[in-house]
Image (cartoon, rainbow, N blue to C red):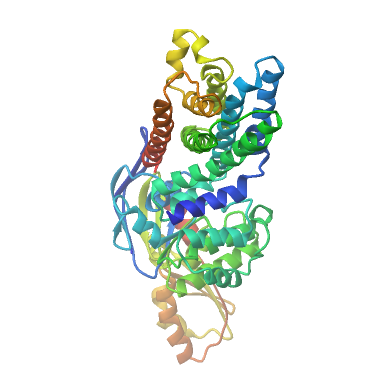
């Protein structure tokens, strides 16, 4: 696990203030969510979604930025050349972006939202939800960044996955009000379960049972991590 | 130290490396020459676990490249054809990170910075190309691997940096590193390598010491020796080399420069002839390269 820590530490130091991380990871989700708040949905409904997209964009942006930069300039191959197991590289990358996502979403949850007069019912569950969401989003970002053929296209690819997910995962429109087909689609979105978990910590009311969201959020992390390791095994 | 048996790489249907075999001995500088696209970099990438082997086997320091990747990676240091340390980190941060990954004492970082005369606190991306290459080489030797892969280490360097790099390569070899050197610079390959392999279109087309390769492909060498005084006895004793005197210059023909020297100097000493200059024209490694890759 020491190697995982070294990679995460290096990534955090190196990519925390990259323009792509800042713009896509912090500014975009906040501006996007604020736009919806202004358009009328109440802050009480949107708050969990705001935290979820802060985590979603923060963690995935950091993962994609770090891996994309390193793949483009062949720096990533320094990690492959080092005597590391593939799981150490994947987890190192996941934890580096997880830390960034955690930072962004904690600021959103515990500093920004109380200023908007929001009451957090279950801070412990909220903390757990933020941690689990970030870890699943980071692993998703790492997986996408590893499998994209041309690293220069990462933002096109990742945004064509992230943006539809925003509208299908109950961030802005409650799943209970969505058509059945969208409800079915939402089952396959990691963001859905993160939003559900976060919403529970604010309102105790969710579309899916709490246990399912907890298991699925962790399951997505597991699935993306295994797929990322497999992607490295196939390539190297 | 490095063994390749039927090493092969396919990229879809394209055969990039075609069942090559070679054996690099401990302590050697092994030159791996070839024109662009011959399969040099692909071979290095296979041996350093950066590209999967399609067919065949390779062993480094006794470990299988296919099955014992982590042990292989501990045994090698690699300088790729691009200088690819982390651009946003300083040289010291890069080396510290590598020291962490290879579990090397941080004191070693200072040693390497001193040995390679690196600007420790400058960001890697801000270094000149020559220093980038040096820093990449420094990172490759940080964990003191027995085997070094240097892929075109002098490409893009000016004369001064290239010479400094060559000096470093010789020093590293003297320190005990076995060096696998790929290059298409014939002069450097000839100067540095103990043995050479020439690869063309994925196949090995020639192998041997620089001298062996040159003599293998040399038809006739023309050697011009200017002496203080031409003596008839010298012309007679060295008649096997078909001497022709032109003023104070004697022109010899030989198949091997070394054989000529072995025969010439005892005779010159015997007749107290002083050699003022000696020139030979004939095959060098570049000629051999052109011959076998045409």
Q: Which is more toward the observer, A220 or A153?
A: A220
Up the image or down, B120 lies above or below B35; here it is below
- Name the image quarter holding the N terminus of chain B: bottom left
Q: Is residue B51 above or below residue B150?
A: above
Query: Would you say A147 lies left or right of B163 here?
Result: left
Q: Residue at x 47, y 90 (%)?
A: B269
Which residue sits at x=55%, y=22%? A160
Looking at the image, which is closer to me, A23 or A36?
Answer: A36
Q: Quadrant of residue B239?
A: bottom left
Q: How many marks?
A: 0
- Residue in view at x 53 percent, y 21 percent: A165
Q: Residue furthest top?
A: A179
**Residue A236 on image: x %, y %:** 39, 44
Image position of A27 with respect to B53: above or below: above
Q: Position of residue B190 (x, y in %)?
A: 48, 64
Q: Position of residue B117 (x, y in %)?
A: 63, 69
- Position of B144 compared to A119: left or right? left
Q: Give above or below for A70 relative to B284.
A: above
Which residue occupies 51% across, 10% down? A178
Could you tell me residue B30's position as x and y percent? 41, 63
Q: Specify whether residue A158 is in view.
A: yes
| Viewer-nearest residue: A45 or A76 | A45
Along the line of sight, which residue is nearer the eye, A43 or B116?
A43
User: Is residue B82 at least partly visible in the picture?
Assistant: no
């Amino acid at each position: 696990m020491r190697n995982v820590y070294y990679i995460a530490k290096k990534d955090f130091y190196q990519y925390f203030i990259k323009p792509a991380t800042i713009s896509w990871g912090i500014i975009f989700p906040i501006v996007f969510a604020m736009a919806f708040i202004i358009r009328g949905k109440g802050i009480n409904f949107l708050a969990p979604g705001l935290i979820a997209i802060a985590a979603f964009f923060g963690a995935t942006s950091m993962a994609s930025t770090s891996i994309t930069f390193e793949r483009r300039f062949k720096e990533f191959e320094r990690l492959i050349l080092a005597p590391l197991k593939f799981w150490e590289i994947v987890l190192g990358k996941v934890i580096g972006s997880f830390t960034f996502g955690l930072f962004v979403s904690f600021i959103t949850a515990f500093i920004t939202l109380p200023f908007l007069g929001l009451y957090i019912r279950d801070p412990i569950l909220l903390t757990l939800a933020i941690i689990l969401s970030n870890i699943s989003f980071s692993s998703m970002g790492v997986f996408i960044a590893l499998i994209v053929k041309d690293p220069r296209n990462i933002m096109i690819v990742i945004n064509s996955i992230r943006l539809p997910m925003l509208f299908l995962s109950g961030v802005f429109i409650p799943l209970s009000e969505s058509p059945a087909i969208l409800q079915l689609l939402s089952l396959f979105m990691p963001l859905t379960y993160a939003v559900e978990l976060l919403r529970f910590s604010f309102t105790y009311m969710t579309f899916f049972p709490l246990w399912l969201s907890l298991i699925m959020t962790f399951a997505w992390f597991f699935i993306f991590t295994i797929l990322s390791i497999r992607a490295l095994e196939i390539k190297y | 130290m490095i063994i390749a048996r039927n090493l092969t790489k396919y990229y879809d249907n394209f055969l990039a490396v075609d069942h090559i075999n070679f054996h690099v001995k401990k302590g050697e500088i092994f030159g791996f020459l070839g024109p662009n696209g011959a399969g040099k970099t692909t071979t290095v990438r296979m041996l350093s676990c950066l590209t999967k082997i399609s067919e065949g086997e390779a062993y480094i320091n006794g470990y299988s490249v296919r099955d014992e990747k982590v042990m292989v990676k501990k045994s090698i240091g690699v300088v790729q054809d691009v200088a690819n340390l982390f651009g946003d980190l300083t040289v010291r941060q890069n080396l510290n990170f590598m020291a962490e990954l290879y579990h090397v004492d941080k004191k070693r970082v200072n040693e390497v910075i001193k040995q390679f005369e690196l600007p420790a606190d400058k960001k890697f991306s801000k270094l000149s190309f020559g220093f980038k290459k040096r820093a990449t080489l420094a990172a490759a030797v940080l964990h003191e691997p027995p085997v070094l892969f240097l892929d075109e280490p002098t490409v893009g360097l000016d004369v001064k940096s290239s010479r400094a790099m060559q000096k470093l390569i010789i020093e590293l070899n003297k320190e005990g590193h076995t060096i696998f050197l790929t290059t298409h610079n014939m002069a450097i390959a000839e100067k540095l390598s103990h043995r050479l392999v020439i690869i063309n279109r994925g196949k090995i087309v020639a192998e041997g010491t620089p001298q062996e390769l040159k003599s293998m492909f040399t038809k006739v060498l023309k050697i011009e020796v200017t002496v203080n005084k031409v003596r008839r006895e010298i012309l007679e004793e060295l008649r096997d080399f078909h001497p022709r005197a032109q003023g104070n210059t004697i022109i010899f023909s030989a198949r091997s420069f070394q054989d000529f020297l072995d025969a010439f100097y005892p005779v010159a000493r015997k007749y107290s002839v002083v050699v003022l200059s000696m020139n030979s024209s004939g095959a060098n490694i570049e000629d051999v390269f052109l011959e076998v890759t045409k």
